[in-house]
Image (spheres, rainbow, N blue to C red):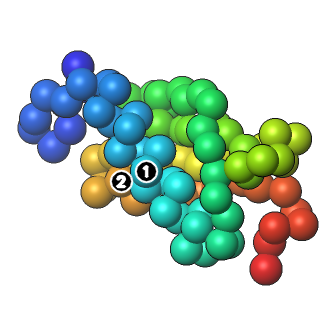
Amino acid sequence: MITVNGKQVEKSEIIKKAEQAAANHFKEKYNLDVEFTDHKFEPKEFASVKVYGNVKGEPEDTLDASVNFADNYSVGPVSLPQKYLK
């Protein structure tokens, strides 16, 4: 359990919401469908989780996103292959 804005939240719930927020971000900003394969919680003071994955169907095209779960699951910064940047 992690305390988020005064409430106890399961880590699995945070990961699920962070992955959804990041997937939405990649879809809206880069028109990419992505899948996530791993995650890492950042130090406590950052209240964020980094999610790692790839473009769907392109396992070599890896990407990641930092998602702030204390700030309504805001996304940023992100990293993705240069060929997807517009």
- Res 66 seen here: yes
- On the image, the x and y values in percent for residue 79 come to 72, 53
Q: Residue furthest top?
A: 1
The residue that appears at 36% across and 53% down in the rendered structure is 73
Q: In which quadrant of the rendered image does the C terminus lie?
A: bottom right
- Mark 1 and mark 2 residues within 8 Å of each other at the beta carbon: yes
Mark 1 lies on a secondary structure that is helix
- The percent position of residue 76, horizontal first and vertical second, equals 54, 58
Q: Secondary structure at mark 2?
A: loop
Q: Amino acid at mark 2?
A: Tyr
**Where is mark 1, residue-wise?**
20
Q: Is residue 11 left or right of residue 6?
A: right
Q: Amino acid at mark 1?
A: Gln
Would residue 10 appear left or right of 58 to someone viewing this image?
left
The residue pinned by badge 2 equals 73
In this rendering, is residue 83 above or below 48?
A: below
Q: Earlier in the sequence, mark 1 or mark 2?
A: 1
Q: Within the image, what quadrant is residue 1 found in?
A: top left
Q: Position of residue 37 (x, y in %)?
A: 62, 31
